[in-house]
Image (cartoon, rainbow, N blue to C red):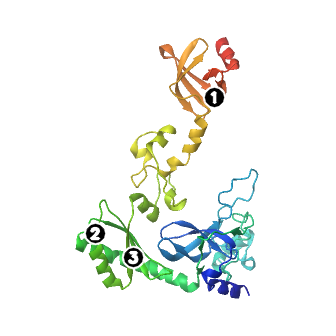
Amino acid sequence: MKKDRLRATESAPAKNRPSSAYIYLVKNPSSNEISVCAWDSVLYPGTSVVAPTRYGLDLGIIMGSADKLGKGYQKGCDQIQGACLHGRCLSKEEEVEKGDEDDLAAEGSPDPADEIVWSDEPDEDPCGDCIGCSARSEIEMVQLSGDTLWIDRLATPSDMARYEEFLVKEDEAMKICREKIACHKLDMKLVTAHFLLGEPKIIFFFTADVRVDFRELVKDLVSVFRIRIELRQIGVRDESRVLGGLAVCGRDYCCHSVTDKLNPVSIKMAKEQNLSLNSMKISGPCGRLLCCLSYEFDFYVEEKQKYPPEGSKLKVGFDLMKITEVNILSKKISLSGAEGRMLTIPSSAVFFNEEASRWEITKEYASEFLSN
């Protein structure tokens, strides 16, 4: 019954789409771009679908529900989704207690993970009993606007087989395209090639320092592949986002695994966070400033409003001292005075006097300082 309902939904024309539906974050595994798409039934993270992207219909992976986007975090909320503890979950019939697993391993029996049985129901929660991802609030329907993207269909086994086949063909397409680029002596670097799953089209992504006339190259590629060809020039940051890799922190690139939005990053963000301005330390493998510099920038700007600005003067006892450093993490303020005197005080020792329009030392700290 459930399969018939899904089949009917997949073939429903766009003009008959309902005005309310469930919305999901859908990630395209080839370009790592995330879009918000609607579907009329509950889907769970990890479900494969065929959804619209900026390049056309392609494979997408459900990352989670998007009905809570834009809503603030409620204090005390315990519906936080964690990572799946084992990637693929056993059905209840195939579950093996930990003690039994140890016994089986001691006897040389096959690994219980080899007995995994995948569910045939595409919208059945595969991790219902997983403590890593079972803490999930109920998904709610939302009212849709006219420009909302809809998932085209749920990915079938044949779709997944074609996707695996395309992955192999993409390597061969890369070799052919590189040969053609060398033949035409074009100043461009080929990044990756991708076959769209839902449309007969190949997309080649490349980087170049200058504008490239690739019209003759496209003609040669069409004659080889007999399919629609599209060449897209991307920047070096987009190259990192598409290819992925390990950053200086030892984790995957943020642009590849966390978000697909490449927000502008400036040197001012590094200065505001008191970071070293050594370009080797604050630049990513793409050669541009680290994306993570923008993550805490707003926090630093907001917190520093609670402190006197660096370079301003502060009267401590009978001395007028200059603020040399404000550390919002340790909540300490460093001061320098005459004859090389250095002083570090806690942030609680200063306050802004509204009447005098200046920062001052609290009476409690001033009396303690003078007594010492």
**Residue in view at x 48 percent, y 17 percent:** 340
Q: Is residue 93 visible?
A: yes
Residue at 67% x, 21% y is 362
Residue at the image position 52 percent from the left and 48 percent from the top: 294
The amino acid type, in three-letter code, at marker 3 is Asp
Q: Are marks 1 and 2 in contact (CB under 8 Å)?
A: no
**103 lies left or right of 29:** right
Q: Secondary structure at mark 3?
A: helix
Label 1 sits on residue:
347
Task: Report the side of 187 relative to 89 (left or right).
Answer: left
* Circle nearer the N terminus (2, 3): 3
Q: Gap between marks 2 and 3, in whole Å?
A: 24 Å
Figure check: 8 above or below 129: below
Label 2 environment density (alpha carbons within 10 Å; few <14, some 14–19, many ≥20): few
- In the displayed structure, would residue 157 be above or below residue 73? below
- Tell which of 194 and 218 is nearer to you: 218
Question: Residue under circle 2?
Answer: 213
Residue contact at pointers 2 and 3, CB within 8 angstroms: no
Q: Tell me if mark 1 has few (under 14), some (14-19) or many (20+) residues whose alpha carbon lies within 10 angstroms of its own.
A: some
Q: Nearer the viewer, mark 3 or mark 1?
A: 1
Q: Nearer the viewer, residue 264 or 105?
A: 264
Foreground disc of the pair 2, 3:
2
Disc 3 and disc 1: Cα gap in Å? Answer: 58 Å
Earlier residue among tags 3 and 1 = 3
Say which quarter of the image contains residue 43.
bottom right
Task: Tell me what residue is drawn at x 50 percent, y 81 percent.
Answer: 198
Q: Position of residue 16 (x, y in %)?
A: 65, 81
Say which of 272 and 244 sits in front.
272
**Residue flagged by tag 1: what amino acid is it?**
Ser
Give the structural element (helix, strand or loop) at label 1.
Answer: helix
- x and y, in percent, of residue 274 in the image: 50, 37
Q: Which mark is residue 171?
A: 3
